[in-house]
């Protein structure tokens, strides 16, 4: 018998495939159940609708990106300051989001799904990112590579800068390709965090 976690991942994997192929509006919980090879009640017990399922899916995918980029940052060159690693990590998250088929599909075709988390409140994904950022900013302040200020404020501004730049990438399409946009985010964040 599959564990609850395995079943949830199986359903989230199926939801990702459906959303990437058809978009959120054309995905149903029945489609997801069929693709996951589970019964409809198994899906409906966990998620009341596609919007809730996609929210959990986006959170899972962002956490995966954060963890992958955090591991990459841990293998930084000896002697690098915390700010350099932090900025590289944020740029890596931006790059990964720009390359992620699910994020790009949602941003390009159904950006209104992100409106609540862009304009009104922090979601689970935001809180996961802030849990990574705040202590690193405090560490950078301790080593002198990050400017003084409330780490919570600095972390939130870094988060919002990356998120809004990534979700607004089409506003730069006539000026910059995605690597150029990531380079600009890097310069912006480095300047903002510098002492």
Image (cartoon, rainbow, N blue to C red):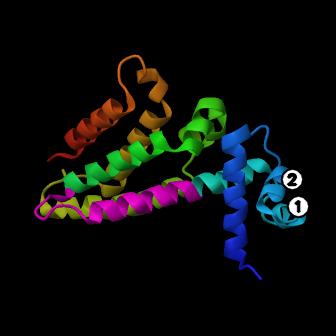
Q: Marks 2 and 1: in contact by CB < 8 Å?
A: yes
Q: In this view, does 191 lie above or below 65?
A: above
Q: In percent of the image, x 47 and y 41: which residue is there? A: 99
The answer to which quarter of the image holds residue 143 is bottom left
Q: Is residue 57 visible?
A: yes
Where is residue 146? Give x, y as percent: 19, 53
Where is residue 94? Give x, y as percent: 40, 43
Q: In this view, does 155 lie above or below 20?
A: below
- Looking at this rendering, what residue extends furthest in the top direction? 174
> Badge 1: few (under 14), some or many (20 or more) residues near its Cα, within 10 Å?
some
Where is residue 73? Give x, y as percent: 29, 60
Q: Give the range drawn in magenta.
A: 60-82
The answer to which quarter of the image holds residue 60 is bottom right
Q: In which quarter of the image is the N terminus?
A: bottom right
> Badge 2: few (under 14), some or many (20 or more) residues near its Cα, within 10 Å?
some
The answer to which quarter of the image holds residue 10 is bottom right
25 sits left or right of 100 in the view: right
Q: Is residue 126 above or below residue 19?
A: below
Where is residue 7? Give x, y as percent: 73, 70
Q: In percent of the image, x 37 and y 44: which residue is there? A: 157
Give the residue pinned by disc 2: 30
Look at the image and say whether residue 103 sits in the magenta stretch: no
Q: Is residue 127 visible?
A: no
Compute the Cα span from label 1 to label 2. 6 Å
68 sits left or right of 114 in the view: left
Query: Helix, strand or loop at disc 2?
Result: helix
Label disc, if present, on residue 52 of the rendered structure: none
Q: In percent of the image, x 24 and y 41: which residue is there? A: 192
Label located before the other in sequence (1 or 2): 2
Give the residue pinned by disc 1: 40
Q: In percent of the image, x 66 and y 66: which residue is there? A: 9
Query: Helix, strand or loop at disc 1?
Result: helix
């Amino acid at each position: 018998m599959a564990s609850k976690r395995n079943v949830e991942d199986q359903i989230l994997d199926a939801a990702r495939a459906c959303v990437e192929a058809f978009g959120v509006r054309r995905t149903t919980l029945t489609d997801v159940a069929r693709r996951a090879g589970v019964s409809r009640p198994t899906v409906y017990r966990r998620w009341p609708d596609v919007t809730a399922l996609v929210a959990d899916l986006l959170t899972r995918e962002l956490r995966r990106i954060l963890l992958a980029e955090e591991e990459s940052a841990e293998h930084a060159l000896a002697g690098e300051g915390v700010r350099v690693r932090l900025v590289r990590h944020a740029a890596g998250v931006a790059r990964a989001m720009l390359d992620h088929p699910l994020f790009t599909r949602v941003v390009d075709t159904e950006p209104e799904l992100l409106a609540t988390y862009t304009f009104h409140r922090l979601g689970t994904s935001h809180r996961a990112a802030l849990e990574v950022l705040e202590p690193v900013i405090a560490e950078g302040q301790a080593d002198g590579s990050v400017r003084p200020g409330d780490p919570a404020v600095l972390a939130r501004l870094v988060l919002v800068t990356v998120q809004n730049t990534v979700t607004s990438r089409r506003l730069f399409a006539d000026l910059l390709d995605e690597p150029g946009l990531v380079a600009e985010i890097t310069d912006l964040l480095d300047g903002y965090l510098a002492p």
